[in-house]
Image: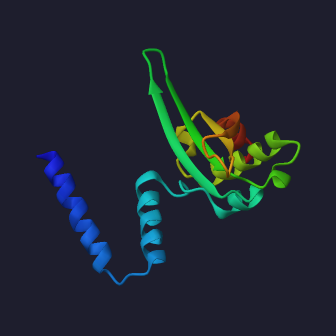
Amino acid sequence: MKKIFQKGFLILSSIFLISCSCEPESLVKGAIWGMEKMMGKGFIPSDEIRALGDFQNMSVNLSQNKTADATESTIFLKLENGDPLLLGNQPDLLARKCAEIYIRDFEKSTDYQQITVQFIQTDPGNPENFAMKEYTFATSDFLTSEL
């Protein structure tokens, strides 16, 4: 029954979008607005972060792992295909700046213990080849610096 409902919803949504004379930008803005209402203001990475490394793609994943002893919660900020010249010789400093901006902008960042910034570069000729650098910071480092 659930699968039938999902397929029906997908078909109705597709028909609406195809027949709609809406502007695609309005649909994207509406989707972003909905995500931020659900996840919290600032969930979508800002253009300020994009500009720091001229990143082509940005995404966020929130993770909470509960164990018997404690809860570990992490924000994963994935930044893809940045300009190598902007990434520079000290990508760790750029990662820290991106984390600082994201923590500042995301209203629910206090709910998470750490933020992991991932820089991913893919080979345009073969997308299966990629390089990744990953930096992890405690969110409390950024929250206390604002006081």
Q: Is residue 30 left or right of residue 100?
A: left
| Up/down of 92 relative to 100, above or below | above
The residue sitting at 55% across, 57% down in the picture is 44
Give the camera-side residue of 121 and 73. 121
The answer to which quarter of the image holds residue 140 is: top right
Give the camera-side residue of 68 and 62. 62
Q: Position of residue 55 (x, y in %)?
A: 69, 56
Q: Is residue 18 left or right of residue 67?
A: left
Looking at this view, name the residue that lies furthest to the top.
69
Give the camera-side residue of 65 and 13. 13
Q: Is residue 130 left or right of residue 112?
A: right
Q: Is residue 142 left or right of residue 90?
A: left
Looking at this view, name the residue that lies furthest to the left.
1
Q: Position of residue 83 (x, y in %)?
A: 78, 55
* Chosen colour scheme: rainbow
Looking at this view, name the residue that lies furthest to the bottom.
21
Q: Position of residue 31 (x, y in %)?
A: 42, 65
Give the camera-side residue of 42 and 63. 63
Looking at this view, name the residue that lies furthest to the front.
125
